[in-house]
Image (spheres, rainbow, N blue to C red):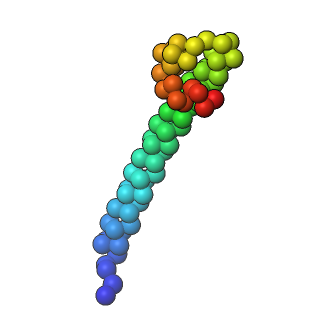
Amino acid sequence: MSLNIREDDLRMAGEKIGFERGVAAGVRRGRRDGIAAGAYQAKRETAKILSDMRLGIEVIAKATGLSEAEIEKL
C-alpha cells in the first residue's frame, strides 16, 4: 500500500532530521573521545619525561594523575 505524496514527504523529512541528529551526536562524541585520548596521551608523555629525569613514581603519579602501575609500564 502506497503512502500519498504528503506522507512520503513527511516521512523523508523525519528520516533526514533523525539522520542529521545522529551525525551531530556522533561528531560530538568523537570530539569528546578524541580530546580525552589526547589528554591521556599527554599525561603519559609527561610521565615518561619525568621518569627519564629519575623522579620518583609517587611524584610522577601526583603530577600527572596516572596510577603508579601505569607509570611503571612506561
The answer to whether residue 53 of the structure is visible from this angle is: yes
| Residue drawn at the location 50% of the way across and 43% of the way down | 30
Residue 35 visible in this rendered orientation of the protein: no
Placement of 27 over or under 3, stated as above or below: above
The image shows residue 4 at horizontal and vertical percentages of: 31, 78
For the N terminus, the quadrant is bottom left
Q: Quadrant of residue 12?
A: bottom left
Where does the image place residue 20, in percent across and percent down from the top left? 43, 53
Q: Is 3 drawn above or below residue 13 in the view shown?
A: below
Which quadrant does the C terminus fall into? top right
Outermost residue to the right: 52
Q: Is residue 61 above or below residue 8?
A: above
Query: Is residue 2 rendered to the left or right of residue 20?
Result: left
**How many labels, in total?**
0
Give the image location of residue 23, x and y in percent: 46, 51
Q: Please name whichever residue, 10 or 39, is drawn nearer the observer in this view of the structure.
A: 39
Instruction: Give whichever of 68, 49 is nearer the camera.
Output: 68
Name the residue rendered at 41%, 47% in the picture. Answer: 25
Looking at the image, which residue is at 54% across and 35% down?
37
Camera-side residue of 16 and 63: 63
Q: Nearer the viewer, residue 52 or 29?
A: 52
Q: In this rendering, would 60 be left or right of 50?
A: left
Residue lying furthest bottom: 1
Residue 13 position within the rendered picture, expressed as x and y whole percent measured from the top left: 37, 62
